[in-house]
Image (spheres, grey):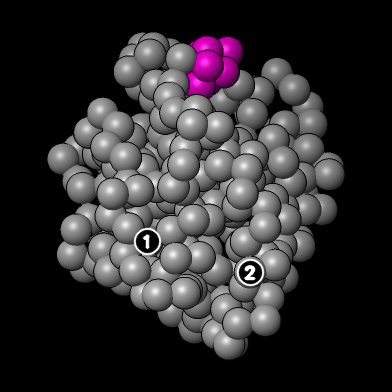
Amino acid sequence: MAKTIVFSSRKGGSGKTTLAFNTCALLADMSHRCLLVDMDSQAHATIHAGLEPFNVKRGVYEVLVSFLKSGAIEREALVRQDNMTILPTNENIAALDVELKDIPNGESVLKDFLMEFDRDFDYIVIDTPPSLGLVTINSLVAADYLVIPVRLDFFSLVGLAQVMSVYYKVSSTLVPNLRLIGLVPIMFSARARVSREALKELEKTFGEVMVLPRLRTDVKVVEASSHGVPVHKYAPKCRAAADLKAITLEILKRVR
């Protein structure tokens, strides 16, 4: 059975997609069968994978709407990219909230769809939008585990409180088995006082055990994204590659 991990954050620019894409790529390189699902209308995970959203004819929106209407499972929409598989997205996903709004059990459509792939993959990784609409709720309902990336600044800590509120509501009502793996500090700089203080606040509030290894600031992350390849393949010796591997190994340890 596949284990589904969702990366979610209330704030854009939190490193959510960077974590989702690179975690999935690293797991795939460890010989795990991995599916990356791009639920974000910005399509950054799709772009990270080297795909062009405007060229995606059958993406998340199209396959979920088709599934809703006829129960069809469009496996041909899955794209094999390097050694992992991606369900890409396009601009149409912005309308998915409207499609789901008046449907009974509309919050569990993605979960029902992904159950059809339960034996095809070891891990399913979901990248979510920064909004808290039905698309995000679907992603949380479909998941077994939640990872929350947090930029180490004041506004991101405020956004974290909103994500945690949604997590507690969803886990107490819709998905009692949804487990929070932990928080990943993003854009950490030991030289920046605000980074150090925000990290201390995270550890104080949630406990050190809930704070996963940090991802340090590194220009190689942006460069790798622009080339459509994982950081560890673009610049294997950079500090971000080391950080992302440490984060992935910790996630792997906690989901086993």
> How packed is label 2: few (under 14 Cα within 10 Å), some, or many (20 or more)?
some
Lateral position of residue 33 relative to residue 254, left or right: left
> How packed is label 1: few (under 14 Cα within 10 Å), some, or many (20 or more)?
many
Whether residue 151 is visible here, answered yes or no, is no
What's the mark number on residue 227? none
Residue at point 61%, 49% (across, down):
92
Give amino acid for label 1: Thr
What's drawn in magenta, residue-wise?
219-226
Residue at point 44%, 47% (across, down):
58
Residue bearing the label numbered 2: 99
Question: Secondary structure beneath disc 2?
Answer: helix
Instruction: Quarter of the image for the N terminus: give it.
Output: bottom left
Residue at point 57%, 76% (across, down):
107
- Is residue 100 shown above or below 54? below
CA gap, disc 1 and disc 2: 23 Å
Instruction: Quarter of the image for the C terminus: give it.
Output: bottom left
Foreground mark, 1 or 2?
Answer: 2
x then y, percent, for residue 11:
74, 46
x then y, percent, for residue 21:
44, 37
Lateral position of residue 255 relative to residue 19, left or right: left
Q: Is residue 151 magenta?
A: no
x then y, percent, for residue 117:
26, 63
First reached walking from the N terminus: tag 1 or tag 2: 1
Question: Secondary structure beneath disc 1?
Answer: strand
Give amino acid for label 2: Glu
- Is residue 208 shown above or below 70? above
Residue bearing the label numbered 1: 4
The one nearer the camera, 29 or 67, is 67
What secondary structure predominates along the stretch shown in magenta?
helix
